[in-house]
Structure formats: structure tokens, C-alpha cells
């Protein structure tokens, strides 16, 4: 893990996903949630192959340059190593690839770092945590999908907290665990209690009348759960 990278200290808390934003107001909506305390902005990239939808590319990342937040790019695309340079050039702070999307995980994660980004590894719900062990020395972030990627409107998978706990047991304590899918006021607490520290929220933020207030409410819920765990089991993930 690149422990000296100052971006790591900001890689925490609620990460609003712009996939649920109003793209006609993208910049202003992102600035609103950042002003409300979000230090991470999540950008979901889908290619129509690894997952059915096609969403956005480097041009959207470039459009958010200068925002005072970590630009967290989640690549739900096949052979992501072929696209990393373009996203890094556009301004991505974090490049997260899927374990299921390439046979060259070590190469992809190492390349992300060589390009100046933090390297993340994402796991689909049905993928065991084993790839984390094999790539731990290259990881700055581990992402647990808490729904199956690519289909909207899914419910949070109830076995996800147990998987987050397994991931936490395999990773160094200073590697953040991110959760993505179905995160809202009803689920963020159990994710935080299980060991997650970065919480991707789309409709639970941008689907609300006041996205800034939604960020504050989600943050408070996560911090409440983390504090309760810290009282029982003091430690880096508490």
C-alpha cells in the first residue's frame, strides 16, 4: 500500500456516485455534496460487455477536474489495463479494476500505480475474497460489490456484511474497504460495523431533494456504527 500518498487520508466516508446525478447539473451537484463533507466522488464506468449498460468515459472524469475531492473511478469493463492510461490522464485519483475482468491483475494494479493513481480491486458478490491475498501488496483499496454490477434497482445482498468481514480479515488494517450497491440509511450501518470505511451511494444521495443533507445523514449513520464497534473492539477499522 502507498502509505505516503496524501490521498489515502481522504479515501473514506460517503462516496456519492454520479451515475445517479442529474448530468445537466453535474458540476454543481458534485460541488454540493463535496461542500456537505464528501471527500470522495465515485465514477462508475461500464462498457456494455463486462456489464450490460454503457455509461461514461474519461471525458466525464476530465469534466470534474479541480473538484476538491478524490475522483474514485470504478472500471466495470473488460481488460481494464487497456484503458487505465486514458483515465489517469483525465484525472482519476483511484483506478479500481474487477478481479473478474482481466487475467492480468498484478499487471493492471501495478500499472494503475505507475500512472500515478491509487490501485483498487473490486469483487463481484459471487467472487470469494481470495484475489485480495494474491494482490495485497499492490492494493490501496478493496471494493465489495453489495449488488451484482450492471443492473439498476437491485436490493442490497444481505450476506454482504459477512463477506466484508472476511475481506477485512485478509487485508492489512490500513487498506480501506469500499462497498457499492444498495447503500442507504438502512444498510450503511451494517456495512460500517462489518469493517467498510468507504460507502458508495447513488440514489440515496442524488435521488433525494437535498443531496447535501443526504450525505450528512449517511455520514452520521456510518459514524454511529463505527463508534459502537470501536467501543467493543478498539482497532484501526473501528
Image (cartoon, grey):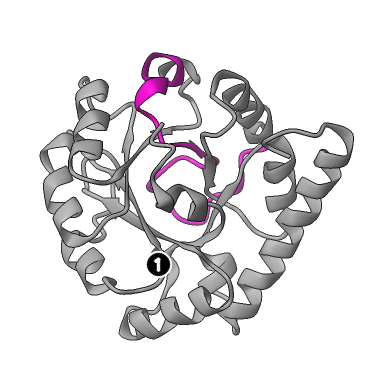
Compared to residue 190, the image places residue 221 above or below, namely below
Nearer to us in this view, 4 or 115: 4
> In which image quadrant can residue 19 be found?
bottom left
Q: Residue at x 44, y 68 (%)?
A: 20
Queried whether the magenta region covers residue 157, the answer comes back as: yes
Q: Residue at x 71, y 69 (%)?
A: 217
Quadrant occupied by the N terminus: top left
Give residue 16's position: percent from left, percent from top: 49, 64
Residue pointed to by mark 1: 18
Residue with the most extreme right position: 232
User: Is 182 left, or right, of 225 in this rendering?
Assistant: left
| Residue 78 visible to an observer of this rendering | no
How dense is the environment of label 1, judged by Cα within 10 Å: few (below 14), some, or many (20 and up)? many
Q: Residue at x 59, y 79 (%)?
A: 212
Q: How many marks?
A: 1
> In which image quadrant can residue 193 be found?
top right
Quadrant occupied by the C terminus: top right
Compared to residue 227, the image places residue 131 above or below, namely above
Q: Which residues are magenta?
A: 132-158
Amino acid at each position: 500500500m502507498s502509505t505516503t500518498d496524501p490521498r489515502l487520508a481522504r479515501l473514506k466516508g460517503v462516496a456519492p456516485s454520479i451515475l445517479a446525478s442529474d448530468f445537466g447539473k453535474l458540476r454543481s451537484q458534485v460541488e454540493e455534496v463535496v461542500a456537505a463533507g464528501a471527500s470522495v466522488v465515485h465514477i462508475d464506468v461500464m462498457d456494455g460487455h463486462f456489464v450490460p449498460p454503457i455509461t461514461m468515459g474519461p471525458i466525464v472524469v476530465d469534466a470534474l477536474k479541480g473538484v476538491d475531492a478524490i475522483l474514485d473511478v470504478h472500471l466495470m469493463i473488460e481488460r481494464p489495463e487497456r484503458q487505465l492510461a486514458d483515465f489517469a490522464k483525465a484525472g482519476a485519483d483511484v483506478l479500481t479494476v474487477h478481479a473478474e475482468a482481466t487475467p492480468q491483475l498484478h499487471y493492471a494494479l501495478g500499472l494503475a500505480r505507475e500512472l500515478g493513481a491509487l490501485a483498487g480491486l473490486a469483487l463481484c458478490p459471487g467472487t470469494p475474497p481470495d484475489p485480495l491475498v494474491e494482490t495485497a501488496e499492490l492494493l490501496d483499496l478493496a471494493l465489495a460489490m453489495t449488488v451484482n454490477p450492471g443492473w439498476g434497482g437491485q436490493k442490497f445482498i444481505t450476506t454482504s456484511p459477512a463477506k466484508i468481514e472476511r475481506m477485512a480479515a485478509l487485508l492489512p488494517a490500513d487498506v480501506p474497504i469500499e462497498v457499492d450497491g444498495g447503500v442507504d440509511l438502512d444498510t450503511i450501518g451494517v456495512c460500517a460495523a462489518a469493517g467498510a470505511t468507504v460507502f458508495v451511494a447513488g440514489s440515496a444521495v442524488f435521488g433525494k431533494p437535498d443531496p447535501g443533507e443526504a450525505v450528512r445523514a449517511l455520514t452520521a449513520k456510518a459514524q454511529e456504527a463505527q463508534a459502537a464497534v470501536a467501543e467493543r473492539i478498539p482497532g484501526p477499522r473501528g
